[in-house]
């Protein structure tokens, strides 16, 4: 029998406070549940994101006090729905924060945590630099969740540019890999669709990529275009450029079908890289 899952990507806007973010998230979540979604997916920094003097400063608090997390746990339990909180800013004792995502089951219980591994330290031009590592402590563990809906991998935003992470998660058994993001508009226009499609195609997985949309309070802009992509690389839902919800029904038999057609996950080979030096070439 087909393994069907109705999902909803909630394309929220960057908000200046946790309370504002939670209010918008709950409004969207109520609508998604009313429309029959089994699993809700939120973007990166969905509990708020601001910038100050060119530096990102997401509102944060300790995990056990995080109002957004607690609110989503209550909603999940009351509505018997699974939720992936793409990520929120969690305070740490070392002065930095964790860019941490969560998966909640239908009882509101946290069944997994993922701390973003790859830091968004980029320099698009002399005036446009972001150094996520200046305020975020990176994680060092890839995460896959064994859920009633299938095996789900959790990554975050800039992780998208590191294909070996997705390969490892897929080889561990992932059928769905999630990439919640607050992708910048400039890089999103150039790379967002093609990178998400590539990760789906390379690994024969569904990709679910909720991305926030709109101006970041204090400066910057998130790209939107939340995506659901099938294992053949086809975009089956695109959130466009307005806040809202996209829905898709996922049939996990498509994963085994794609991998049967192109079984590249079993074709990896060990190899070495050799640098050839033209000065060592023999001359006839």
Image (cartoon, grey):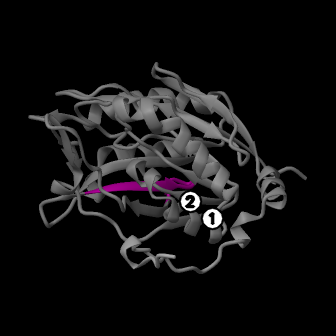
Q: Which residue is mark 1?
A: 170
In this orientation, which residue lies closer to the viewer: 155 or 58? 155
Density class for disc 2 (Cα within 10 Å; few <14, some 14-19, many ≥20) is many
Query: Which residues, given as a range, are shown in magenta?
Result: 98-109
Residue 106 seen in this snapshot:
no
- Whole-percent x, y for residue 4 in the image: 78, 46
Q: Residue at x 43, y 29 (%)?
A: 189
In the depicted structure, whether residue 231 falls above or below residue 225: below
User: In the image, which disc is placed on residue 63?
Assistant: none
In the depicted structure, whether residue 176 falls above or below residue 190: below
Badge 1 marks a residue whose secondary structure is: helix
| Left or right: 203, with 254 as reference point | left
Q: Which comes before the other along the chain, label 2 or label 1? A: 2
| Left or right: 217, with 105 as reference point | left
Q: Residue at x 36, y 62 (%)?
A: 117
Residue ranking furthest to the front:
284
Q: Which residue is mark 2?
A: 153
Badge 2 marks a residue whose secondary structure is: strand
**Residue at mark 2 to residue at mark 1: CA–CA distance:** 8 Å
- Whole-percent x, y for residue 270 in the image: 60, 80
Residue 72: image quadrant is: top left
Magenta-drawn stretch contains 2? no
Magenta-drawn stretch contains 100? yes
Q: Residue at x 52, y 44 (%)?
A: 195
Residue 123 seen in this snapshot:
yes
- Whole-percent x, y for residue 19 in the image: 28, 34
Q: Are marks 2 and 1 in contact (CB under 8 Å)?
A: yes
Residue ranking furthest to the left:
53
């Amino acid at each position: 029998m087909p393994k069907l899952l109705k999902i909803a990507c909630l394309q929220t806007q960057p908000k200046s406070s946790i309370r504002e973010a939670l209010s918008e998230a709950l409004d969207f979540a109520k609508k998604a549940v009313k429309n029959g979604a089994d699993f809700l997916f939120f973007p990166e920094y969905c509990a708020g994101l601001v910038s100050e003097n060119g530096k990102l400063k997401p509102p944060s608090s300790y995990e056990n006090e995080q109002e957004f997390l607690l609110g989503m746990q209550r909603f999940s339990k009351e509505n018997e729905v699974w939720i992936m909180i793409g990520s929120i800013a969690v305070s740490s004792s070392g002065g930095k924060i964790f860019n941490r995502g969560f998966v909640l089951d239908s009882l509101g219980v946290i069944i997994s945590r993922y701390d973003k591994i790859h830091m968004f330290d980029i320099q698009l031009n002399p005036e446009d630099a972001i150094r996520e590592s200046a305020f975020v402590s990176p994680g060092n563990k890839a995460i896959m969740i064994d859920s009633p809906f299938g095996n789900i991998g959790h990554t975050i935003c800039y992780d998208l540019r590191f294909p070996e992470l997705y390969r490892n998660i897929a080889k561990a058994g992932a059928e769905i890999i999630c990439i919640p993001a607050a992708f910048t508009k400039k890089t999103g226009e150039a790379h967002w669709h093609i990178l998400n499609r590539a990760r789906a195609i390379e690994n024969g997985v569904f990709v679910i990529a909720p991305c926030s949309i709109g101006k970041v309070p204090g400066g910057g802009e998130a790209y939107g275009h939340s995506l659901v992509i099938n294992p053949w690389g086809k975009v089956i839902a695109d959130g466009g450029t307005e806040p809202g919800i996209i829905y898709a029904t996922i049939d996990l038999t498509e994963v085994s079908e794609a991998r049967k057609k192109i079984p590249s996950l079993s074709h990896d080979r060990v190899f070495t890289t050799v640098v050839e030096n033209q000065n060592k070439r023999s001359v006839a």
